[in-house]
Image (cartoon, helix red, strand yellow):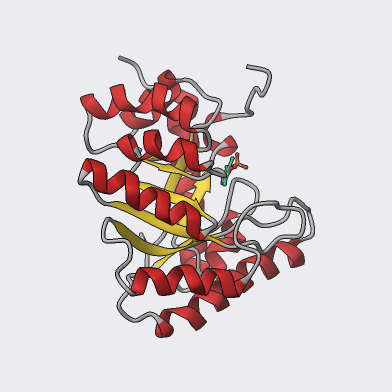
Amino acid sequence: MSVDISIKNNLERIKSRIAAAEKKSGRPQGSVKLMAVSKFHPAEAVSQAFEAGQLLFGENRVQEASEKFPPLIAEAPEIEVHMIGQLQSNKVKKAVTFASCIQSVDRLELLQEIEKQCSKLNRSIKVLFEYHTGEDSKSGYTSEVELIKSLEECAEGSFPHIIPCGFMTMAPFTNDEKLIRKSFITLRELSEKLKPQFPDLPLTELSMGMSGDFEIAIEEGSSLVRVGTAIFGERDYTK
Ligand SMILES: *Cc1c(COP(=O)(O)O)cnc(C)c1O
């Protein structure tokens, strides 16, 4: 099967821009992971990215992801998909059957549901805590107190099937680089403040940066960038 030239080329271009941003900010080469966000793109596009060497994918909607990924993962178990969109509790049951991480945990109730469903399947799942840092984003914890409550429950051992791996945020949709940077700095500082309070939780991941702002995110400490449009092209929301 032939690899789609543009997806392959786009991945290569993004990877070299990531490497340049790592270098510019004095961070070790290869320290930033690249997630390919395949929402609204067909399974065929995911296969093409996989053939070009991409293993980590992100999806927003459980139904869409559950149609695309289980067949691909059955063929290639090294493929990982993370859920990155706002998640309703009634979608958790399905999500935990195929996702390796839920990056968009934004409330204690969601952790409780993830634990319940994972314990039924006797499987563990990684999670990130999404924190609201950008004015016009609607998702994520808006209260640090609530976030800390969730972390405390994790640290107390309430969720044996959940591995809390770090934090995620979305910058505001703006061209104002200062505002974007401020949002990434907010998440990094929050993470640096909370990590010592929860030394037994492996809170190493900082998931921040998308097609338009991933270089700024890397400069501010991102460990995982979520890139959709710059790899797969514009999304067709009418589908
Ligand atoms: C869609 C989406 C992305 C990717 O956005 P692009 O601008 O297409 O790179 C990243 N993160 C989240 C949470 C998203 O919903």
> Would residue 10 be found to the left or right of residue 123 on screen?
right
Q: Position of residue 130 (x, y in %)?
A: 54, 58
Q: Position of residue 100 (x, y in %)?
A: 32, 45
Q: Residue at x 49, y 72 (%)?
A: 149
Q: Position of residue 195 (x, y in %)?
A: 42, 79
> In the picture, residue 228 is in which quadrant?
top right
For the N terminus, the quadrant is: top left
The number of discs equals 0
For the C terminus, the quadrant is: top right
Q: Considering depth in this image, is 236 or 1 the residue closer to the camera? A: 236
Q: Residue at x 47, y 26 (%)?
A: 63
**Ligand 1 quadrant?**
top right
Q: Residue at x 33, y 73 (%)?
A: 201
Q: Considering depth in this image, is 86 or 69 the residue closer to the camera? A: 86
Can residue 58 be seen in this snapshot?
Answer: no
Q: Considering depth in this image, is 158 or 191 the residue closer to the camera? A: 158
Residue 124 position (above or below residue 222):
above
Q: Position of residue 11 (x, y in %)?
A: 45, 38
> Would residue 222 be found to the left or right of residue 51 on screen?
right
Residue 167 position (above or below residue 210):
below
Residue 171 position (above or below residue 77):
below
Q: Residue at x 38, y 37 (%)?
A: 93
Can residue 193 be seen in this snapshot?
Answer: yes
Q: Considering depth in this image, is 212 or 191 the residue closer to the camera? A: 191
